[in-house]
Image (tube, rainbow, N blue to C red):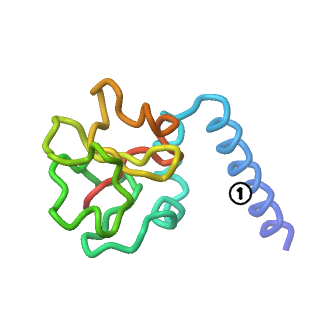
Amino acid sequence: MLKERRSRVVAAALVAVAILAVLYFGREVRLMAAHVLGPACAADVPPNPWGYDFCAQNGMEIYEPPPGFCSYFRCDQYFWPVPKNGFVEQCEDQTYSSSGGYLPGGCSRHGGVGRWGTLYQH
């Protein structure tokens, strides 16, 4: 019983440290936290036939989304045409941009990059 309680306390402490790190360090830690938190990185994604999610582990950035992408995801007005040499990412206002990565202006009209940022395919 004591061992079980200790495990719960340690787990709660790790979650608290992860949350504080995300608040302090920003997007880079959010991507690393996606590896640790597991299912949470898939929870905020609209259901879609491709299984896209925010889980970076074993995922690849989406540089050429399929034609029906915007039927499932709320795309920004500049999403098409692609490819733009950027990848798909979620903006702060929950829209999706195809200008992710090192392209200037990705999500700039939508409050910046969102909570999870990059959308991945597996």
**Vertical placement of residue 18 versus 44, above or below:** above
Please indicate whether residue 47 sits to the left or right of residue 71 in the image. right
Q: Secondary structure at mark 1?
A: helix
Q: Residue at x 77, y 63 (%)?
A: 8
Residue 75: name its quadrant: bottom left
Residue visible at 40% across and 56% down in the picture = 55
Q: Quadrant of the C terminus?
A: bottom left
27 in relation to 98, above or below = above
Q: Relative to residue 8, is residue 114 depicted above or below?
A: above
Q: Say whether residue 77 is left or right of residue 3.
A: left
Q: Is residue 27 left or right of residue 79?
A: right
Which residue has dot 1 on it?
11
Seen at 52% across and 48% down, the residue is 93
Q: Position of residue 119 (x, y in %)?
A: 35, 52
Neighbours of disc 1 within 10 Å: few (<14), some (14-19), many (20+): few
Residue 26 in picture, x, y percent from top left: 57, 32
Q: Quadrant of the N terminus?
A: bottom right
Q: Position of residue 6 (x, y in %)?
A: 81, 60
In the rendered image, residue 70, in percent from the top left (x then y), is placed at 28, 62
Q: 22 left or right of 85?
A: right
Q: Quadrant of residue 73?
A: bottom left
**Residue situated furthest right in the rendering:** 2
Q: Amino acid at mark 1?
A: Ala
